[in-house]
Amino acid sequence: MTDAESRPVSLAAVGRSTLILTGGAVIVQMIGFARQLFLAAEVGITSGLDALLIAMAAPLALVGVLTAGVQTAIVPAYAEAKDERGPKDAKRLVGTVLVWTAIGGMVVSLALWVAADPIIAITGPGLSETGTADDAVRYLRALAPLGFLLAVSSIFYALCQAESLFPAIAVAQVAAPLLALAFMIAYWDAMALDGLVLGTLVGAIVSLSVVIVATVIRRVAPSPRLMVRGLGLKSLLRHAAPLTASAAILQVNLIFDRAVASWLAAGGVSLLRYGESLVRLPFAAISPAWGQAVYPALVRANRAPGETDLAEMTERMLRYALVFFVPLAALTLAVAPVAVAVAYDRG
C-alpha cells in the first residue's frame, strides 16, 4: 500500500491547516497595515516613497516569474516521487530544483545590481521628473539580495507545504513583515525609509531560516545536486512552464501599474499602494492560506484510490470559497470610503 493510500484526505485536517495559515496571514496583514499607517503618518503621499515602492517591485516581480510555476509544481512532483520511489529520491528531486532555483536567484540578484539604472528607468519613468530616480536605484541595489533569498525560500516553502509543515510556514510568513516593521520604526530617526529596506532584508533572511530549520527537524531537508534522472524532473518542468507564463503576465501587470502611477503624478505610486492595502487586507488574510492548505489536499485526493475523492473535495472547496469571498468582496466595496477616511485622513 502506498503512502497516498494510507493517508486518506481529511477535510478536518484541511480545516485545521487553513486555520493555522489564516491566523498567520491575518497577523501578516495587520502588520502590513500598521506599516502603511506609519508611512502615511510620517511621509504621506510623496515621490520619495514612490521611489522605494518601485524599487521593491522589481525583485518581487523577477523572483515571481522565476519561482511561481516551479513552487506550485513541486508539491505534486514531490508527492509522486515520495510515494513511488521513497523519501530519499523525493529529497533528491527537490534538491535539484533548489540548486537551479538558487542559481537563478543569484542571476536575478546580479542583474538587479548591474542593471539598476535601466530597470528603474523602465519601471518608474516618472521618477526622473521628481528627482528621485537616483534614490530608487540606490534602494534597488540594496534590495538586490532579495532575488536570491526569495528564490531559495520559495522552494523551502513548497517543501513545507508538501509535508504539511503549516505552523512553520505561518511563523516564517509573520517573521518577515514583523522584522521589517520593527527595523523601520526603530531606525526611523536615523535612517528613515532605509530602515525599511534593512528590515526587509533581515526579515527575508529570518523567514528563510525558519523554513530551513523546519525541514531539517522533520528530516525532509532537500539533498542538493545538479541533476537527477528518472525522478520526474521533466514532468515537473512541463507542469511549471504554463504556470510560469501566467505568473509573468501577472508580474508585468504589477510593474505596469506602478510605472503608469509614477508617470501620472508625484506620489501616485504611494497613493496606489495605500488604496491597495485596504483592498488586500481582508482577501490577503484568507485567500493565500486557503490555497496553501487546500492545494496539497487536492494533490493527495487525486492520488488516492477512486475518482470521486478529488471531485468531492473540489466541489466542497468551491462552495466554501463562494460563501467566504463573494460577501467579502461586496463588503469591501461598500465600506471603502469609510475605510479610507478612518485609516488615512489623519496621515
Image (cartoon, grey):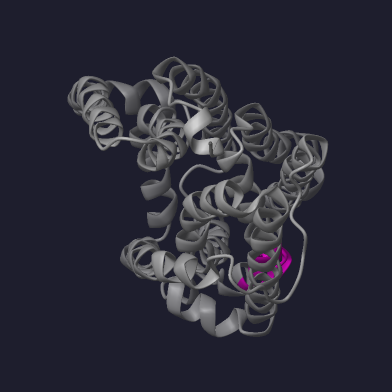
For the residue pair 120 and 1, the one nearer the viewer reads as: 1
The x, y position of residue 233, in whole percent, is 55, 69
In the displayed image of the protein, which residue is found farthest to the front? 1
Q: Is residue 1 left or right of residue 85?
A: left
Above or below, comparing residue 162 to residue 93 in the picture: above
Q: Is residue 288 left or right of residue 331?
A: right
- Residue 125 percent location from the top left of the image: 42, 76
The answer to if 19 sits in the magenta stretch is: no
214 or 184: nearer the eye? Answer: 214
- Which residue occupies 43% across, 26% down? 9
- Number of disc labels: 0
User: Quick one: 24 or 255, which is closer to the camera?
Assistant: 24
Q: Nearer the viewer, residue 263 or 54?
A: 54
Residue 306 placement (x, y as % from top left): 30, 35
Q: Residue at x 38, y 60 (%)?
A: 254
In the image: residue 26, left or right of residue 181: left
Q: Which residues are magenta?
A: 137-148
| Any part of residue 208 in sight | yes
Q: Residue at x 36, y 31 (%)?
A: 283
Asked if residue 124 can be seen in this view, the reply is: no
